[in-house]
Image (spheres, coloured by chain):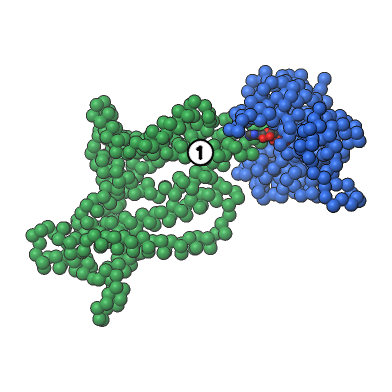
Chain colours: A blue, B green
Amino acid sequence: MPLLDVQNLRVTFVTEDGEVKAVDNVSFSVEPGETVAVVGESGSGKSVTALSLARLVPIPPARYDGGKILFDGKDLFSMGRRELQAMRGAKISYVFQEPSTSLNPVFRVRNQIAEAIHLHRHDVKDVRAEILHLLDLVGIRDAARVMDAYPHQLSGGMQQRVMIAMAIACRPALLVADEPTTALDVTIQAQILELLRELRKKLGMAVLLITHNFAIVANIADRVLVMYHGKIVEQGTVAEVLRHPKHPYTKALLACIPKLGTKQRRLPVIDHELLASQQP
Amino acid sequence: MFNYFLRRLLYAVPVVFGVMLLTFVLFFMVQSPRMMAKRNLGPKATPQAVENWLHNRGYDKPLFFNTSPGKSWYDSLFFNHMRSLIMFDLGDSDSTGERVSTKFKKGAVPSLLITVPAFVLGLYLSLVTSLFLAFVRKSKLDVGGVIACVVLMSVPIMVYVIVGQWLIAVQLSWLPAFGFTPSGLTTAKFLMLPVLVYVCAGLGGDVRLFRAIFLEEVHQDYVRTAQAKGASHGRVLFVHVLKNGMIALITLVVASLPFLIMGSLVIENFFGIPGLGSLTLDATRTSDFAVMRASVYLGSLLYLFGLLLTDLCYASVDPRIRFK
Ligand SMILES: Nc1ncnc2c1ncn2[C@@H]1O[C@H](COP(=O)(O)OP(=O)(O)O)[C@@H](O)[C@H]1O
Ligand SMILES: [Mg+2]
């Protein structure tokens, strides 16, 4: 049985300019321990899909228009509020794009991680030791200092490590990382991705990694979903999709990856009109 | 930190000086010291009595600069009064001759008896109500709440006074309408109505403002993080949002703290409470310049003190702020 099974999910945003089908009939599944990458350009519905998995999309302006989300075989849409809250952070947890705004600016790191522990893990006696352990897991050396810091006193990379420590505090079965490196420097990006890969191995959790950057997919993911205009236009193993992309949009995305050692003056630009005319 | 306070203090000097200058100009534009003397001594006063009155109080000096030969240029009304005020010598009342400082001490107590309970109660009610409205945002309850706020805001304070006195004191006779006896339980009973009126008059505006501040916070990324951690709605609101919202609130609330001592002009006047508010109002009525300049002076000092207090509180809640 898959850990996560999404069937025909539809999410619509109601705005002043009309309705936007942010997620349009999306189906996919994630097996326990598997890393699945979701690729697509900005606005293609990746974040809304990700947030839906714990029913975190704000309603209104959004509306769930049908479909099913089964987590561990349980239907998310038939869960009550308490049941949902018990699941969030415990079984499925999130790392977001902007660590600087995603952490609460007025609480110390220690208290923010402690909150994640207090909410779900009543068995932990020594919370401080657990926090130190978590900070060690995410590769923070001077944990004692970081613990007492406020978010703004840390670098972006450190902040994201703290976010990850918070997300794994309850050893979730699924970690959803929504463009976790987009806001970071290039050198830090690689470190954070390496950390995610390492943690997945250590903790045996499944990872849903969202990115608009195909280049990072090959190293880390088992499978890839390609999203375009709220739809999944292609999915398969990394090897399949990278070597033999079927959909024209995937081909166009792949053409945008700069290759080392090749001389390219300009990166190709995706021609949306052409793509639309080729849509099956 | 020390530099910061020194700078604040230096910045206060021109502000206070400017405010006092304006007060002097405005007051003596309307009336001369001679008119003040006649008003206080009555129409039958002899010219000699007027001269004596002026001389005893220093009102026979020129207003700003002394140009008479043999006198220093600053031997004038303005500079002499400023010198005493700086030393916190508030002088004697021009109408009763009582020490102004004694008058203020007597007036501060009734003023604070109204404003402090009203402030605490009002702040508590507005915080809870605005958080609740932010919690049920965009529902019918929220819309109804906002409409109620606008209605509360649009009603002039006089209407609260009149309706309060008529309904609660006259029709229902629950509480006394007027008069202030400074003794125990009767005082407490009497104070309830003015406090209630004071709270009602401010509630609508505060709730609307606080609600807007909290709604601003509700859309921040850290709120989504807290929800993703599995925090309940109540916890997200009362822990995460409240503490962030407090930062914006504090600037508004703390700056007004020192003014509690000045009381409320309208309420003290209508309920016959001998506080600093009615003291100031009486001073304008009787041309008591000594009391007026002292209240303006203390008022501007309190204002600056409020700003300083705001900065201090700001720095203590918001870890991102440090004094430079
Ligand atoms: N809060 C919102 N209000 C209105 N529309 C939204 C909101 N959030 C997302 N959308 C719409 O949903 C679509 C998908 O957005 P998103 O999932 O954030 O894209 P991605 O993460 O792939 O960049 C976009 O077209 C956007 O217009
Ligand atoms: Mg996104």
Vertical order, B232 against B283 (above or below): above
Residue A149 point in image, percent of width and height: 67, 47
- Nearer the observer, B38 or B268: B38
- Nearer the observer, A225 or B241: A225
On the picture, is B74 further left or further right than A234? left
Residue A189 point in image, percent of width and height: 79, 46
- Nearer the observer, A185 or A162: A185
Q: Label 1 is found on which chain of the structure?
A: B
Vertical order, B236 against B10 (above or below): above
* Mark 1, residue position: B212
Residue A30 point in image, percent of width and height: 81, 26
Image quadrant holding the N terminus of chain A, namely top right
Kind of residue at disc 1: Ala
Image quadrant holding the C terminus of chain A, namely top right
On the picture, is A236 further left or further right than B42? right
User: At 19% across and 56% down in the image, what residue appears?
Assistant: B96
Residue A145 seen in the figure: no
Q: Quadrant of residue B253?
A: top left
User: At 85% across and 37% down in the image, what residue appears?
Assistant: A251
User: At 88% across and 47% down in the image, what residue appears?
Assistant: A259
Q: Residues within 10 Å of mark 1 (few under 14, many from 20)?
A: some
On the picture, is B152 further left or further right than B176? right
Residue B287 seen in the figure: yes
